[in-house]
Image (spheres, rainbow, N blue to C red):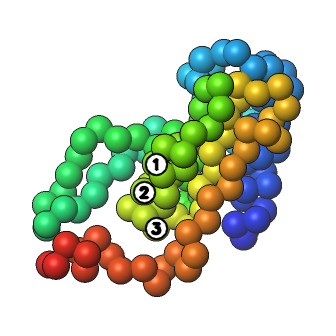
Amino acid sequence: MNINDITGLVIGSAMAVHRRLGPGLLESAYETCMVLELAERGLRFQRQYPLNFSYRGQTVDCGYRLDFVVEDQVIVELKSVSRLLPIHLAQMLTYINLTDCPVGLLINFNVQFLKHGLRRVVLRPPRSLPSLSDLCGE
């Protein structure tokens, strides 16, 4: 399955959840329903995926969790905010940079029409950037 197929199925899942629930709920409600929709579509995913990273040769575990990692290729971050802010995009870019996932989806459920709450984030080219250890001079 390619990235576009995966992101299409994830977005379809989010649309189904939004269509049934609408805006205004807590992120945790949407997350729980997304589990059902992703599973129904046959996607492999991990919920609340722990994000550990290396800094100067040491593993750092600060308790960061990605809402979903789908098919080991797409990070999905759910929001229920009045609007997506630049910090949400920066957060996703950092997550992409710290993982092997080339694509991220920011999904804000607190909108009237879900298409206004979707943001696909791609870091190009995903594999040619220097590693964190290269950047830290190790």
Residue 60 locus on image (x, y percent): 20, 52
Gap in Å between the C-alphas at discs 3 and 1?
15 Å
Side of 39 where 87 appears, left or right:
left
Mark 3 belongs to which amino acid?
Answer: Asp
Side of 4 where 67 appears, left or right:
left
Q: Mark 2–mark 1 contact, CB under 8 Å?
A: yes
Mark 1 belongs to which amino acid?
Answer: Gln
Mark 2 belongs to which amino acid?
Answer: Thr
Which quadrant would the N terminus be assigned to in this image? bottom right
Looking at the rendered structure, which numbered label has been put on residue 100?
3
Q: Which residue is identified by label 2?
A: 94
Q: Answer above or below: position of 123 versus 75.
A: below
Q: Mark 2–mark 3 contact, CB under 8 Å?
A: no
Label 2 secondary element: helix
- Of the residues tagged 3 and 1, which is closer to the observer? 1
Label 3 secondary element: loop
The crowd level at tag 2 (other Cα within 10 Å; few <14, some 14-19, many 20+) is few
Q: Which residue is identified by label 1?
A: 91
Side of 49 where 75 appears, left or right:
right
Q: Which residue is rendered at x = 60% and y = 32% of the image?
A: 79
Gap in Å between the C-alphas at discs 2 and 1?
5 Å
Residue 40 locus on image (x, y percent): 76, 40
